[in-house]
């Protein structure tokens, strides 16, 4: 029976860059297309949740929240000191697989690219703290107005003598109107 052993890797392109994995201890990671030089990933503890994420399609942006529990004191210190530099940094989420002896098998498979919005530290109990990072896929900070349909009534409300849209009512799907003089 096959055993699937995998962890997630989070690379934050802040200044300085941060690299975490969802395991305990330190994990050496080789350079690849995302990570510019070999680094050591810090154990981010137990991943409380990893929400489903989608690819950005038709301008629909999404906001995700990842929470890590049982993080080490070093990870807490780095999260507290570097929280300001994480805002708006690019964040890559990847998956790494291991063999039965917990040795890395193959390169990291980078699943998604996000942008960090904020990082917070919370305390569940006196002995356990968690780090939460909010990520966005696309621009979630602004909204766009809905499409506007140009009608003669709308135009006359703004400009009573303007008749530029007087023929709009005669145009519908499947019809066309020649432009220019008749």
Image (cartoon, helix red, strand yellow):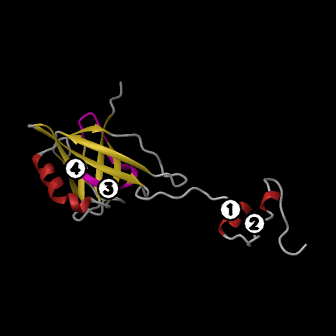
Q: Could you tell which of marks 2 and 3 lies nearer the N-terminus?
A: 3
Residues shaded magenta:
97-119
Secondary structure under tag 3 reads: strand
Q: CA distance from mark 2 to mark 3?
A: 44 Å
Whether residue 112 is visible here, answered yes or no, is yes
Mark 2 vs mark 4: give the one in front.
Answer: 2
Q: Which residue is mark 4?
A: 120
Whether residue 151 is visible here, answered yes or no, is no
Secondary structure under tag 4 reads: strand
Q: Is residue 24 left or right of residue 169?
A: left
Q: Which residue is mark 3?
A: 117
Q: CA distance from mark 1 to mark 4?
A: 48 Å
Residue 167 lies in the magenta stretch: no
Q: Which residue is mark 1?
A: 154
Secondary structure under tag 2 reads: loop
Decide: few, some or many residues near mark 4? Use Cα within 10 Å; few <14, some 14-19, many ≥20: few
Q: Position of residue 57 (x, y in %)?
A: 53, 51
Query: From this viewpoint, which residue is outermost toward the bottom?
Result: 181
Q: How many marks?
A: 4
Would you say the residues marked 1 and 2 are in contact, meaning their CB atoms lie under 8 Å apart?
A: yes
Query: From this viewpoint, which residue is outermost toward the top?
Result: 1
Q: CA distance from mark 2 to mark 4?
A: 53 Å
Q: CA distance from mark 1 to mark 2?
A: 9 Å
For the C terminus, which image quadrant? bottom right
Mark 2 vs mark 3: give the one in front.
Answer: 2
Q: Could you tell which of marks 1 and 2 lies nearer the N-terminus?
A: 1
Residue at 32% across, 29% down = 3
Q: Which residue is mark 2?
A: 165
The vertical placement of 74 against 103, above or below, is below
Q: Could you tell which of marks 2 and 4 lies nearer the N-terminus?
A: 4
Would you say the residues marked 3 and 4 are in contact, meaning their CB atoms lie under 8 Å apart?
A: no
């Amino acid at each position: 029976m096959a055993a699937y052993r995998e962890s997630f890797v989070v690379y934050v392109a802040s200044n300085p860059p941060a690299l975490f994995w969802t395991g305990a201890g330190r994990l050496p990671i080789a350079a690849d297309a995302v990570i510019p030089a070999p680094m050591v990933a810090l154990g981010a503890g137990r991943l409380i949740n990893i929400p489903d994420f989608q690819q950005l399609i038709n301008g629909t942006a999404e906001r995700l929240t990842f929470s890590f529990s049982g993080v080490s004191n070093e990870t807490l210190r780095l999260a507290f000191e570097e929280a300001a530099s994480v805002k708006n940094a690019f964040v890559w989420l990847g998956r790494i697989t291991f063999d039965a002896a917990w040795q890395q098998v193959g390169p990291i498979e980078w699943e998604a690219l996000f942008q960090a919005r904020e990082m917070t530290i919370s305390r569940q109990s006196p002995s356990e703290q968690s780090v939460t990072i909010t990520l966005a896929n696309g621009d979630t900070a602004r909204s766009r107005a809905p499409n506007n349909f140009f009608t003669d009534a709308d135009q006359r409300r703004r400009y009573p003598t303007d008749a530029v849209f007087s023929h709009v009512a005669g145009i519908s799907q499947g019809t066309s109107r020649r432009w220019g003089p008749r």
